[in-house]
Image (cartoon, grey):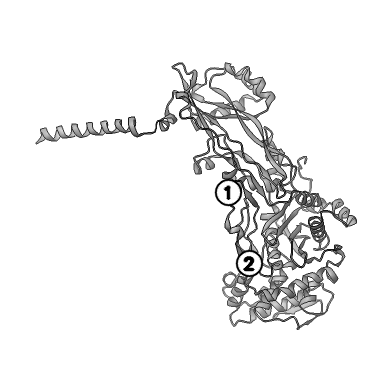
């Protein structure tokens, strides 16, 4: 029995070996083994990255050639480090850091040693490189910006990090990847596919030609060109108006959800993040802790919305049938409420206020009444708050919008559970949280959410998800961007609110901002601004906020402007919004005095108030 068992074991083992050899010889793709063959050197051929165009076909981002020094650590022989460093204009510390990084990645696989050599550097180096075994030069393309605007929109490309490599096997050490903006959002479309050439080496580790006449070589597949929704002319104008100011501008085409402009101020020239100086420039931008140019203020700057939010308070109250356009209140320039007779100040000028004049003159008392009636309609304040909150959220506030932008914040729209947790031992009600009525309190929004809210009002009850992609070469855009999102407010209730916003321009808080020939509907806003200085909560100059759409009939643009520390809403944000609207609809600006006033205005002193010294500012 033992004899047969031993024989069977030998036969079985033999069959396994024979089967494995047969599989390797007949079925396994030979190209799979090339990755591990030490006699084969693999050279990646990088594809041309897709171009980026604006909505009118203007080229914004192209490519330019650059050269990388690549190293295979195990092939490196003893070399004159001093000479090599002088050729590359680096010091020994940088040499060792780059070499050790490549060695940790893989001793036998090629990786980037030094990137972004210029044509001149390459020409000089190529004559000497034969003296340094294990080092090679490969050509690839980096971005060539045809514009100095839209850095936050376009984004930039940089070397992959270990996390990128672990998540996507496409990338190798030293590869480039989109890190922000469109470059990040549409990385897979823009990057294309790398090609590979396999080079046979002899026993002395010398290249002797293409492996099997290039049988397994592949050609690079260029990235797809994309067209974005941004209007480059309008974007440039917005950035000019925001010079020496901090904040954001978001403009949307209400009929499609296409983003017309996405300004974050202050910005920077996107070309700063290309080439060998990229790392140094990035560090300077990153360390600017006051102006924070890398922080996209149009997408992730959360703040209280202020008075523009009153339009939604009115819509929720109309939907809940707790106010009508006929009723009015008498405002004494203060609203007294609660058992402790708390006071909410009002700056509307006082007198009788209805829905129209409440919006046009921004009466706090009127909207405090509307909010209270909405919550108090229900016996349980928590239930009333849930219903109110759901109305507000249907405009895209309090949630991520589901757009195709690389960053974003959801903001905050509180509901009943939110306040139940805040006041577990206290029976709270509408007067406890009355600051919500005027866009203060616990409500937080971003400029893009305000612009989207305004677009939904312009459309009388629906919006399209804001998006930045207009078309992709050979590919359809996501159907999410072409699908209507309905609000919870019936269309009939929008007309009185729109009329109130129109009166903001005709005889209200923005009456001095009229634009000849354009009927604009808008809403001014002033948001309180607090910060901590040496651990003490300190109030600084209010933020200036403005939302608007135009024309009143068949709107073509909806816009939100935030100017940090910009005083009241119509002072700077309102002026900028009016100028932007006229620029987009007419192609030129007739309000030259107002334009010059905005261009000349600097708010830098406001931003330096909490600090003793001036911050570092990169040359822009």
Label placed on residue 413: 2
Name the residue located 53 percent from the left edge and 17 percent from the top edge: 78
- Between label 2 and label 1, give the one nearer the viewer: 1
Name the spot of residue 249 as percent of width and height, x first.
Answer: 74, 56
In three-dimensional space, the C-alpha distance between marks 2 and 1, rounded to whole angstroms, equals: 36 Å
Name the spot of residue 329 as percent of width and height, x first.
Answer: 78, 82
Q: Residues within 10 Å of mark 1 (few under 14, many from 20)?
A: few
Rendering quarter of residue 394:
bottom right
> Given the current orientation, which residue lies at the most extreme front position?
474
Please determine whether, in this image, residue 403 is positioned above or below residue 83. Answer: below
Please state, as top left, top right, bottom left or bottom right, where the N terminus lies in the image.
Answer: top left
Task: For mark 2, give the secondary structure.
Answer: loop
Label placed on residue 402: none
Q: Is residue 426 visible?
A: no
Please determine whether, in this image, residue 453 is positioned above or below residue 75. Answer: below
Judge by depth and name the residue closer to the eye, 531 or 237: 237
- Circles 2 and 1: CB distance less than 8 Å? no
Q: Earlier in the sequence, mark 2 or mark 1?
A: 2
Apparent side of residue 413 relative to residue 245 in the rendered image (left or right): left
Name the spot of residue 101 as percent of width and height, x first.
Answer: 54, 31
Label placed on residue 475: 1
Name the spot of residue 315 as percent of width and height, x first.
Answer: 69, 74
> Given the current orientation, which residue lies at the most extreme right position?
593
Please determine whether, in this image, residue 252 is positioned above or below residue 18. Answer: below
Judge by depth and name the residue closer to the eye, 445 or 157: 157
Apparent side of residue 352 relative to residue 321 in the rendered image (left or right): right
Please give the count of numbered marks on the rendered protein.
Answer: 2
Q: Residues within 10 Å of mark 2 (few under 14, many from 20)?
A: some
Q: Is residue 103 visible?
A: yes
Please state, as top left, top right, bottom left or bottom right, where the C terminus lies in the image.
Answer: top right
Task: For mark 1, give the secondary structure.
Answer: loop
């Amino acid at each position: 029995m033992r004899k047969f068992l031993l024989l069977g074991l030998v036969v079985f083992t033999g069959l396994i070996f024979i089967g494995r050899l047969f599989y390797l010889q007949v079925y396994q793709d030979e190209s799979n083994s090339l990755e591990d063959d030490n006699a084969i050197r693999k050279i990646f051929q990088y594809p041309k990255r897709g171009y980026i165009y604006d909505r009118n076909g203007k080229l914004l981002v192209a490519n330019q050639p650059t050269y990388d020094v690549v190293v295979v650590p195990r092939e490196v022989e003893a070399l004159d480090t001093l000479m090599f460093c002088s050729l590359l204009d680096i010091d020994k510390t940088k040499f060792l850091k780059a070499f050790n990084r490549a060695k940790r990645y893989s001793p036998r696989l090629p990786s980037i040693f030094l990137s972004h050599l210029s044509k001149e550097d390459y020409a000089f180096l190529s004559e000497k490189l034969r003296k340094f075994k294990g080092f090679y030069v490969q050509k690839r393309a980096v971005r060539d910006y045809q514009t100095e605007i839209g850095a936050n929109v376009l984004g930039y490309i940089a070397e992959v990090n270990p996390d990128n490599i672990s998540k996507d096997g496409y990338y190798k050490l030293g590869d480039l990847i989109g890190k922000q903006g469109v470059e990040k959002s549409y990385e897979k479309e823009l990057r294309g596919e790398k090609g590979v050439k396999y080079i046979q080496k002899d026993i002395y580790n010398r290249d002797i030609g293409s492996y099997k006449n290039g049988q397994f070589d592949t050609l690079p597949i260029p990235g797809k060109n994309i067209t974005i929704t941004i209007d480059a002319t309008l974007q440039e104008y917005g950035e000019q108006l925001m010079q020496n100011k901090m904040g954001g501008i978001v403009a949307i085409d209400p009929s499609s959800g296409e983003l017309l402009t996405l300004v974050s101020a202050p910005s920077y020239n996107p070309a700063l993040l290309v080439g060998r100086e990229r790392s140094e420039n990035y560090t300077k931008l990153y360390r600017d802790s006051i102006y924070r140019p890398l922080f996209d203020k149009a997408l992730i700057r959360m703040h209280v919305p202020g008075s523009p939010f009153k339009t939604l308070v009115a819509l929720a109250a109309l939907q809940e049938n707790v106010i009508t356009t006929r009723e009015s209140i008498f405002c004494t320039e203060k609203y007294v409420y609660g058992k402790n007779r708390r006071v909410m100040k009002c700056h509307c000028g006082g007198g009788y206020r209805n829905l129209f004049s409440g919006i046009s003159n921004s009466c706090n008392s009127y909207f405090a009444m509307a909010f209270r009636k909405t919550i108090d309609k229900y016996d349980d304040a928590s239930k009333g708050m849930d219903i109110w909150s759901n109305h507000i959220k249907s405009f895209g506030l309090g949630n991520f919008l589901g757009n195709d932008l690389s960053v974003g914040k959801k903001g905050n729209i509180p509901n009943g559970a939110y306040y139940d947790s805040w006041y577990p031992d206290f029976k709270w009600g509408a007067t406890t949280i009355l600051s919500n009525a005027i866009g203060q309190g616990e409500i937080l929004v971003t400029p893009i959410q305000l612009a989207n809210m305004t677009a939904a009002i312009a459309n009388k009850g629906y919006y399209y998800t804001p998006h930045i992609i207009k078309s992709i070469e050979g590919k359809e855009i996501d159907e999410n961007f072409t699908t209507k999102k309905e609000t919870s407010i019936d269309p009939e209730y929008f007309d009185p609110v729109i009329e109130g916003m129109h009166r903001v321009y005709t005889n209200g808080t923005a009456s001095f901002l009229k634009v000849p020939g354009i009927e604009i509907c808008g809403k001014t806003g002033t948001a309180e601004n607090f910060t901590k200085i040496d651990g003490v909560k300190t109030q600084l100059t209010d933020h200036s906020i403005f939302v608007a759409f135009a024309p009143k009939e068949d709107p073509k643009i909806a816009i939100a402007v935030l100017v940090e520390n910009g005083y009241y809403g119509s002072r700077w944000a309102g002026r900028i919004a009016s100028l932007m609207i006229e620029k987009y609809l007419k192609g030129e600006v007739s309000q030259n005095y107002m334009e010059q006033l905005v261009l000349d205005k600097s708010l830098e002193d406001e931003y330096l108030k909490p600090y003793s010294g001036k911050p570092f500012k990169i040359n822009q």
